[in-house]
Amino acid sequence: MGRVIRSARWTAALLLACMGPGGAVSAQDDAGFQTFLASLRPRALAAGVSAATADSVLPTLTFNARVVALDRAQPGADPNAPAPKFAPYYRTHVDAARISRGREVYATQRPLARRFEADSGVPEAIAVSIWGNESNYGVYTGNFDLLRSLASLAYDGRRRELFTGEFLDALKMVDRGVPREQLKGSWAGATGNPQFLPSIYLRVARDGDGDGRVDIWRSPADTLASIANYFRDAGWRRGQSWGLAVNVPAGFDERQVTNRLLSPRCPRVFARHSGWRMMAEWRALGIQPQSREWPEDRVLATLFQPDGQGQTAYLLTSNYRVILDYNCSNFYALSVGLLADAVEK
C-alpha cells in the first residue's frame, strides 16, 4: 500500500511540475510546443500529408501535460519482484459478463466473421476476444484527443521518433477521410474498438462491411476484419490453436525442458516459457490436457506454468506468439485465448 501511495504522490507532483499555476500549461511549454509543431509541418508534407490537412490540424493543437505525466509515470519492471499469479487477472478479464457479451457478438456477426476466418485463417472467436480484451467490445475506447496526445508525447522527447511517426500517421488518417472528431483514444495513441495505433490502422485496417469506409470505431464488421488482417499479417498459422490447458504430473522435472534461448523481444515474457517440444513429446512426459483434444503430434509448443507447480499449466503454440505480437504480456495473451475458447463454446 505504501508503494501505491508514494506512486500516486509522485504522479501528482509530476503533473504539477508539467503545469503552470492553476493547472495551466506554462507559457514556456506552450511556446516550445508551437515551435515544435511548426517543425513538423515540412516532415508531414514530405511524408505525403496534404497541406490542407496539416494547416487545418496543426494550429488547433495545444500541449497536453497530462499525457506526458501519464507516460512518465509508467512503472518499470522490477527484475527482482516475484512473478504475479495469473488467477486474479483471469477472474477480471475472462469474467461472465465479458464471455456473455462475446457470445452475443460472435452470434450476431457470425456470417461476416466466418468469411473473415476463411480469408485470413484467423478464428472468428480470436478476433472477438481481442475486441473484448481491448475495449470491452467498444464500451471504452478512450476519450483523449489523439492528435493532441501524440504531438505532446513527441514534443516531450522521451520517445520522440516513435510518437512523431504515429502523429504523422494520424494526419494521414485524416487525409484518408477519418473525421477529425473521431480520432479519440487512449492517452498513448491507441484508438477504436481494437485499439490500433495510427501506423497499425494504416497498415492493416480493412472495410469489412463493404460500405467504402474503414470504421474501427462504430462498425463491428470493420473491427473484426481489421483484427483478423492484423493476425494474418503477424503470421497466424491456419488450422492451429493458440494452445491448451494441461495438467503437469507431480514431481515433473522442469530442468529437462529448460529454455536455453534468449529472446531479443520481451525477454521477461519469453523467459517464463520452457523450450519447444512436439506435442507427442509432451504427452510422453506425462502432460495431460484438461479438456481440449491433443493437437497433431508434430505441432510444437512450449510449457508455461503461470501459477506454479500443481496449478493449471498451458502448452502454447506459435500462434500464441502471434497474440503476444499484439500485446507482449503472457497474462494478456492467455486471457485472449481463454476468452476465445469460452466465447466459442
Image: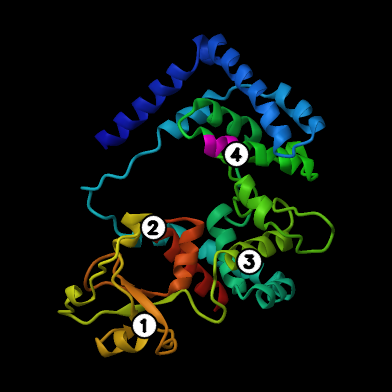
Question: Mark 1 belongs to which amino acid?
Answer: Gln
Q: How many marks?
A: 4
Looking at the image, the residue that sits furthest to the front is 46
Q: Which residue is mark 1?
A: 290
Earlier-in-chain disc, 3 versus 2: 2
Give the main secondary structure, helix, strand or loop, of the magenta stretch: helix
Residue 89 marker: 2
Q: Residue at x 23, y 71 (%)?
A: 258
Earlier-in-chain disc, 4 versus 3: 4
157 relative to 81 in the view: left or right: right
Question: Callout 4: few (<14), some (14-19), or many (20+) C-alpha neighbours within 10 Å?
Answer: some
Earlier-in-chain disc, 1 versus 3: 3
Earlier-in-chain disc, 4 versus 1: 4
Task: Quote the CA–CA distance across marks 1 and 3.
Answer: 28 Å
Question: Mark 4 belongs to which amino acid?
Answer: Gly
Q: Pointer 3 and pointer 2: residues touching (CB < 8 Å)?
A: no
Q: Residue at x 54, y 10 (%)?
A: 28
Task: Quote the CA–CA distance across marks 2 and 1.
Answer: 20 Å
Task: Quote the CA–CA distance across marks 2 and 4.
Answer: 33 Å
Residue 165 marker: 4
Q: Residue at x 62, y 17 (%)?
A: 35
Figure colour scheme: rainbow
Write the start and end of the magenta stretch as one range.
161-165
Task: Quote the CA–CA distance across marks 3 and 2.
Answer: 25 Å
Give above or below for 76 relative to 17: below
Q: Which residue is mark 3?
A: 228
